Amino acid sequence: MYATTGTRVGVLKGRHLNAENFSELCRLFSLTGKTALVTGATGGIGEMIATGLAKAGADVIITGRNRDTLDAAVQRIGPFGACRGVHCDVSTPEGVDELASRIGTESLHILINNAGTTWGAQFSEFPDKAWPKVMGVNVYAPFMLAQRLHPLLASGASPADPARIINIGSIFGVSTDVASAYSYSASKAAVHQLSRVLARDLCADHINVNAIAPGYFPSRMTAFISRDPELSEQVEAAIPMGRQGGPDDIAGAVIYLCSRAGSYVTGVVLPVDGGRLLS
Ligand SMILES: NC(=O)c1ccc[n+]([C@@H]2O[C@H](COP(=O)([O-])OP(=O)(O)OC[C@H]3O[C@@H](n4cnc5c(N)ncnc54)[C@H](OP(=O)(O)O)[C@@H]3O)[C@@H](O)[C@H]2O)c1
């Protein structure tokens, strides 16, 4: 699809979009004028989401714990739209408070709780420390962020144009396939339920809360799969669509939920998994 002059403003696979239809498409999906925060967007799914939001017109703020990787991600996203980084650790109350104080805008329209971590070990060897670490980043952080950023989210929200929180869960919060990632799968199930409870409570403040449950996407977290051709083949064979997810798959779902198009949707857990949960 591209913009031209005259009444034919876009071409999609040879079919022409007239000016009215093109502007209706923009009205439904554009995020111009919105400010969005994406946690842990120094790579992987977070960077895919932040890039998609920037392309859709939002002013994007990303977080990361390492200044160099954060700066590098801002440089990569920058050509697609407005993006700045805030260096912080969202898994601690101090980090979240610092982030809240450094947002620097009167309103925040979109919060994407993406930062996440995992731990894999056999049942008998699963260490105690894998519980507070994983639950801290995956569950406690999204709750703290929703709570501390609530005034900023509520201030820009209205019944016709609610603020949005999207928590990144996982298909492993639904399926029992990952027997050795005990705290991870429990944390992701908790993220899904937390999203539903927050959706109910925050409706009155015009804040929609949804979760996305991704399937297999390339990232640092899943690098152990992509590095191993045999394992990659096995993982992709278990996906009915036969492929891993990519930037358009996750960004498209997020843009839908954050735009006018998704403004009547709250409390859902949306699998974006190529049909993995069906198999
Ligand atoms: N990739 C998949 O197939 C898949 C599938 C289902 C769900 N997910 C979920 O998608 C989200 C993104 O994961 P990813 O796969 O893109 O992995 P990733 O590339 O490892 O990204 C995870 C991000 O979380 C941040 N993070 C990790 N620990 C943190 C901590 N203690 N405090 C603050 N930030 C922390 C990291 O940021 P810094 O290290 O820069 O601080 C990093 O940018 C996670 O919630 C993950 O559970 C991924």
Image (tube, grey):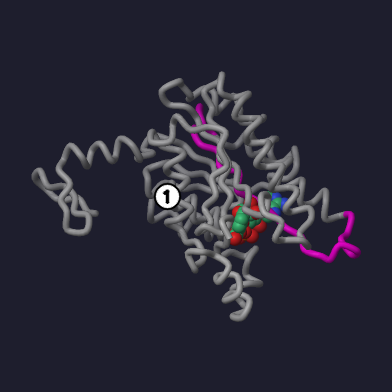
Magenta-colored span: 104-128
Mark 1 is surrounded, within 10 Å at the Cα level, by few (under 14), some (14 to 19) or many (20 or more) other residues, namely: some
Classified by dominant secondary structure, the portion drawn in magenta counts as loop
Q: Quadrant of the C terminus?
A: bottom right
Asked if the magenta segment contains residue 116, the reply would be yes
Closest to the observer, 275 or 115: 275
Closest to the observer, 127 or 108: 127
Q: Position of residue 62 (x, y in %)?
A: 55, 48
Q: Quadrant of the N terminus?
A: bottom left
Residue at 51 percent across and 27 percent down: it is 106
Figure quadrant, ligand 1: bottom right
Q: In the picture provided, is 45 more to the left or to the right than 117?
A: left
Asked if 92 appears above or below 70 in the picture, the reply is above
Residue at 38 percent across and 33 percent down: it is 260
Q: Secondary structure at mark 1?
A: helix
Closest to the observer, 256 or 132: 256
Residue 78 location, quadrant:
bottom left
Q: Position of residue 149 (x, y in %)?
A: 61, 31
Q: Which residue is mark 1?
A: 252
Residue at 82 percent across and 65 percent down: it is 121
Q: In the picture provided, is 187 more to the left or to the right than 29?
A: right
Closest to the observer, 269 or 10: 269
Residue 107 visible to an observer of this rendering: yes
Asked if 169 appears above or below 215 in the picture, the reply is above
Instruction: Specify the farthest residue to the left.
Output: 6
Q: Residue flagged by tag 1: what amino acid is it?
A: Gly
Residue at 70 percent across and 45 percent down: it is 189
